Image (spheres, helix red, strand yellow):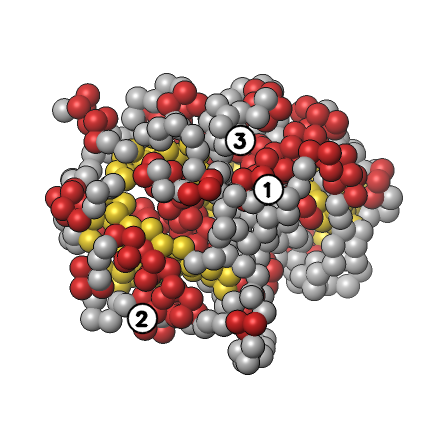
Amino acid sequence: MNQENKDCYVVDGKLALPYQYFAGRTGSRFLISLRDKKKIFGVKCNKCDKVFVPPRQTCERCFENISNNWVELSDTGEIVNFSVVRYEGKHLPRKPPFVLALIKLGGADTPMTHIVEGIEPEKVEVGMKVKATFSDEPTNTILDLDHFEPV
Amino acid sequence: MNKKHKKNRNVAIIGVGQTVYSSHREDVNQPEMIHEAVSLALKDAGLTMDDIDCVVHGNMELFEMVHQPDMWHTIGDGAYGKSAFRLTTGGTTGATLVSAADNLVASGMYDVVMAVGFEKLQEGHTTGGITNMADPLWTRHLQTGALTGATASYMIQEFGEERAKRAAMKHRIDMDKHAVLNPNSHRSFGLDYDQMDDLIKNSPQLAGELRLIHMCSQSDGACVVIMASEEKAKKLSNKPVWIRDHITIHREENFSTMFTYDMDERDPTTHRVAAERLFERNGIKDPVEYFNVFEMYDPSSWWGLDWLRDFFLLEGDEVLTMVESDDFKIGGKIPVNPSGGVTSANPIGATAMIRVAEAALQVRGDAGGHQVPGEVNHALASGFGGTYWTVLFMLEKNLDWQKGEQ
């Protein structure tokens, strides 16, 4: 096998491409509330009786426009599932080991993914109550909600 | 929701070609690697490129950092001067290519269509590509890419730590034992069951209880499937394998709602919905009984174990009992992934097509060392993509299922 690769040349390259992503009105409103008021909002589909967070313009299921049905959510929620991330990667938000959890906020039907800190990873449990910690400096991203900590 | 699907005309798989799957292919560039699989498929079908009316080509976006690969692969796939389409639907790409080719032939637009799926994961940055499928606003900063410990966590909650972990590892070793029999496998370790306790404890943890040994590899390779109309297939092939039906269940890309919207009332997965609808409209009451083999897109052993419940419509702990009873092994009640499956080779844009191709080889009796014993009349093959979507195929040796329909 190695013999077959003798004198086979490999060209190295690297791409680093900037991009923009336009958040749209619905996404922007969520981020502005998060940044300026430290409040978390979801949108409710009345037809499906589901509250989505993060918000979206249309319900995936029934395709109704739900972007004006804002509902304020609690900044406290319950861990419905989690992983202790143990491998290192540039795309990861923290150095391993750290906890990524699915957190269902009070008033929401969809869990949202976020970091859980302030507890040993080994001690995190499903059903644990956690509270949002907001970032000190605005980032204008979902990371204005910096992480969650056990209540 | 389950509209009656009736093909305009029957379509058969008449040729299959696969490269060897491996971590490095420095000896060939992309079109050269594709050319290997194309040549093998043409040889298998006894055709030349003159017989091919249309080429459908696909792989993962961003993975090799190549724009318009279908264009520069023309010298490898022979599409010069022909109709050609490019499709990319994430992990399901390979199965979507076969779906599309089947539709193109069934429609009457083309008589013979060649589907080409490839990936050279070694050339690009897989995690870079995969993490870019996450929404830049909500989850791009808060995800682990393809690695998720969530299913392990759910199964451990449901069945208890000891039994769930042992079943996942048993399944992993079963798949490796199949992979050893397949000369195209990228990874075949020669694992044995006495290593189970050691692997459960000591294989490095990636995310939660998802360990390195459970996870698929990054592979290089290409797969080609040639499909023809009934009239052509009967003329050209001694062993046509009929594409009875296929279904695609799509959904939003969303990492947070990947497993469900509502944790108290978990929704059926796209796999379960696909299986229920496909079997219902084809009158399949008991898939374990009906099918003789299943080639499943199983990116990790935890997912493989969990998803078998959905595809076979199993309830409670049936799946665990079946793994424990060797039901999914070659020679078992319903062999799963005699090829070794995705944990043995994962050239992603080809992976879901390899499932269909391997299922077709089983129906023909041409799978070589990993051929399952006994007659294979009915085969199932699945594709999986992203944060859960599904393509599911039913293949048949004979056209006799249609008697009841007419």
Which chain does tag 2 point to?
Answer: B
Residue B237 location, x and y as percent?
A: 20, 46
Viewer-nearest residue: B158 or B287: B287
Residue A22 location, x and y as percent?
A: 52, 64
User: Is residue B252 in sight in this rendering?
Assistant: no
Q: Which of marks 1 and 2 is nearer the N terminus?
A: 2
SS class of the residue under badge 1? helix
What label sits on residue B74 in the rendered view?
A: 2
What label sits on residue A15 in the rendered view?
A: none
Residue at the spot of label 3: B329
Residue at 52% across / 43% down in the picture? B181
Viewer-nearest residue: B73 or B177: B177
Residue A65 location, x and y as percent?
A: 43, 44
Which chain does tag 1 point to?
Answer: B
Q: How many labels does the image show?
A: 3
What label sits on residue B176 in the rendered view?
A: 1
Q: How far apart are marks 1 and 2 (CA)?
A: 35 Å
Which quadrant holds the N terminus of chain B?
top left
The amino acid marked with disc number 3 is Lys
The amino acid marked with disc number 1 is Asp
Residue at 34% across / 69% down in the picture? B76
Q: Is residue B273 above or below residue B388?
A: above
Residue B392's quadrant in the figure?
top left
Q: Is residue B343 above or below residue B266?
A: below
The residue mark sitting in front, 2 or 3, is: 3
Quick check: do tags 2 and 3 share a chain? yes
Q: Distance between the residues labelled 2 and 3?
A: 39 Å
Quick check: do tags 1 and 2 share a chain? yes
